[in-house]
Image (cartoon, rainbow, N blue to C red):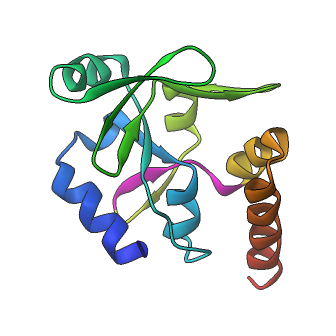
Amino acid sequence: MDKRELIAQLIALDLPKDEYVVVGGGVLTAHHIRDTADIDPVVSPDLFCHLQVTWNQKIRPNGKIGLYQGCFEAYLDVNCGDSQESFQTLLASSELIAGIHFMHLSTLAEFKRNYGRNKDLSDLNLIAEFQNNK
């Protein structure tokens, strides 16, 4: 999905705007860096409890519970190696795009460096190219 579709999906979800921060590929899409197939919000503990009633549960690779519904996969935090961020930390450093909180691009780059998967390395190249063309 492109940025227009991403924003429309988030608006249609109708979650309280100060209770989630979009992380992962959605951040790249919001900056027109590349399209994404899914949307990963890190949510407040209160919103997580609310979503548990209707969303499906899934055990994440780190052993923590994630929730999913359609193209959305919600978490309480993001972590990889030395990069560990809670909802509150992400919210405090987020950037607003179309009135929606997104993980700061530099924070996303740090996570992608720590993950180090092929797709993350590719995304790091795209982020560098985007920043060089600003």
Q: Is residue 14 left or right of residue 28?
A: left
Name the foreground residue: 74 vs 91: 74
| Residue 103 within the magenta-colored segment of the rendering | yes
Picture coordinates of residue 33, whole percent (x, y): 62, 75
Q: Quadrant of residue 28?
A: bottom right
Name the foreground residue: 31 vs 80: 80
Residue 94 drawn above or below residue 65: below
What residue lies at 56% left-to-right and 71% top-to-bottom? 31
What residue lies at 55% left-to-right and 77% top-to-bottom? 32
Q: Is residue 66 left or right of residue 130?
A: left
| Residue 58 within the magenta-colored segment of the rendering | no
Name the foreground residue: 105 vs 38: 38
Which quadrant would the N terminus be assigned to in this image?
bottom left
Q: Is residue 49 left or right of residue 60?
A: left
Q: How many marks?
A: 0
Residue 91 drawn above or below residue 102: above
Stretch of the chain drawn in magenta: 99-105
Picture coordinates of residue 44, whole percent (x, y): 37, 24
Picture coordinates of residue 4, whole percent (x, y): 34, 76
Picture coordinates of residue 117, whole percent (x, y): 79, 48
Q: Quadrant of residue 62?
A: top right
Residue 122 drawn above or below residue 33: above
Which quadrant would the C terminus be assigned to in this image?
bottom right
Spot the residue most to the bottom. Answer: 133
What residue lies at 74% left-to-right and 77% top-to-bottom? 130
